[in-house]
Amino acid sequence: MDKGLGLVRMSRSAASSDSVWGGFLPSDYLTILSDSSASLTFSSKKDLFFYLSHNHILIDQGKKSFSLDKWRGKKNYMIAPRDLVIIWGDTPEYWVWVSHPASGFKEVAMLELVWWLEIHAKISTSKLSLDTNNAAYLVFKLQEEEAYGFDDHPAEASLTLGADKICTKSVFLDPLIERRPHQGHPWYSYQPAEIDHSIMSCLECTKAGVEKCGLVVQGIEIRPKEDSPPIDIEVTKHSSLGKEY
């Protein structure tokens, strides 16, 4: 299947129709936009969709960013470091807060030295796209010449729904061990039901008692899993095949 906006078959008139592109936007998109400090003006819902699928906007007083998955039209959230609970995060001997040109947030958290690494994130399931398998990703980098303590000892990632821990997983933060790009490690997948509970994700690396240094945390991203089906829409009133979006 071709990518783009999944496989979208529609007439040229439908391709620019607000009624069609409004179906790709989340039902609460106006509420989300009203929570942003950015002044966004668009002539059509198609333009708005393409903007949100290629850009992040800050919401919740800069504590989160929001975008849309361009293949599926699902919600993506990034939780800023300042909205995470980082154990010892306010102790300068252990963590420092600095600006970073590659981050959309005001600050990132840079690990100076800890033996006990523990990071928590929390978001309400009511904010997530329904009927969607989501995954959480720690967005981070390791300082090449300064990072140590992550190669031999895995961290434990867990998911809690309400008061119940429903998933745990061991992950290595060193990308050479995981053999995957280091900008994000999947922690869990979760399909939200129509309930307003909070989900809590937690990353802990506490058991080994090993010094750790050089981790830079940009945030935790919650977005659809890569195996979620892309948008597939067919407008049957017209037989012409439109552009790939």
Image: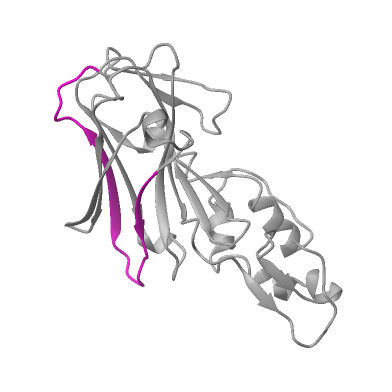
Which residue is drawn at the image coordinates 32% and 17% (left, top)? 148
Q: Which residues fall within the magenta stretch? A: 186-211
Question: Residue 202: where, in percent of width, then height?
Answer: 26, 43
Report whether 16 appears left or right of 225.
right
Instruction: Please identify the quarter of the rendering in which residue 128 is found.
Output: bottom left
Which residue is drawn at the image coordinates 54% and 30% (left, top)? 103
Question: Residue 220: where, in percent of width, then height?
Answer: 41, 41
Instruction: Tell me: residue 40, above or below residue 195.
Output: above
Residue closest to the eye, 3 or 36: 3
Q: Is residue 195 magenta?
A: yes
Instruction: Tell me: residue 9, above or below residue 173.
Output: below
Q: Is residue 192 magenta?
A: yes
Q: Quadrant of the N terminus?
A: bottom right
Residue closest to the eye, 186 or 159: 186
Residue closest to the eye, 122 or 177: 177
Question: Residue 132: where, in percent of width, then height?
Answer: 45, 66
